[in-house]
Amino acid sequence: MKSFHLTGQALDFVPIQDGKAQWAKAAYGKFPFYAAIQYAEKLGFESGYRWGWDAPHLQYNYKGYGTDKALTIAPAPPINVMSKEEILALQEKLTKLGLDTNGVDGIYGKGTTNAVRILQRRTGLTIDRWCSRRSNPGQDRRAA
């Protein structure tokens, strides 16, 4: 689970009884749901049940309010771990498959990135637009 909520983790849970969601705060005060809240609190989670509102909410405050910098820092660009020769071979294979890499030049640019994305989509791989020994070791075999 990923969450940038208050620089920690947050989740909501809803008790289900007889196939129906029980959103009322009273449902959270019954076993086994209250026991789940108590267990989460022992792990360091804060419970919306204790606030008197937002009973489904559990959150783990990693650093606390106002410290989240995740959306103000640019992500690092992916590191290309392929050699120029490997990129040339990949571009040749992608071109043979009818995918446009904008030329076979050994540069992992926009054309190669888009061609890899298309191949990943077609073959059911994770679509991350990067082909490397580290991130996608089966890519060369599938493109062959």
Image: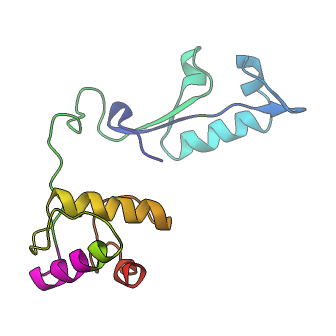
Residue 103: % across, % down: 14, 68
| Residue 48 vs residue 134, the one in the foreground | 134
The image quarter in which residue 61 lies: top left
Q: Is residue 83 left or right of residue 68?
A: left
Residue at x-position 10% and y-position 69% = 107
Rendered view: 84 above or below 110: below
Considering the image in quadrants, where does the C terminus appear? bottom left
For residue 22, side relative to residue 125 (left or right): right
Q: Which residue lies furthest to the right in this view?
A: 18
Predominant secondary structure, magenta span: helix
Residue 110's x, y, as percent? 17, 56
Q: Kindly identify the residue that appears in the image at 50 percent across and 39 percent down.
A: 45
Coordinates of residue 134 in the picture (x, y in percent): 29, 77
Please give left or right for residue 104 compared with residue 138 in the image. left
- Note whether 79 is above or below 66 in the view shown: below
Is residue 19 located in the magenta-colored stretch of the structure? Answer: no
Measuring from the top left, give residue 117's x and y in whole percent: 34, 59
Q: Which of 87 and 65 is in front in this view?
A: 87
Q: Give the range drawn in magenta.
A: 81-92
Figure label count: 0
What's the coloring here? rainbow
Q: Report the front residue among 36 and 119.
A: 119
Q: Tell me where residue 135 sits by quadrant.
A: bottom left
Q: Does the magenta stretch include residue 85?
A: yes
What residue do we see at 64% from left, 36% from top? Answer: 37
Residue drawn at the location 75% of the way across and 32% of the way down: 15
| Residue 86 to residue 3: above or below | below
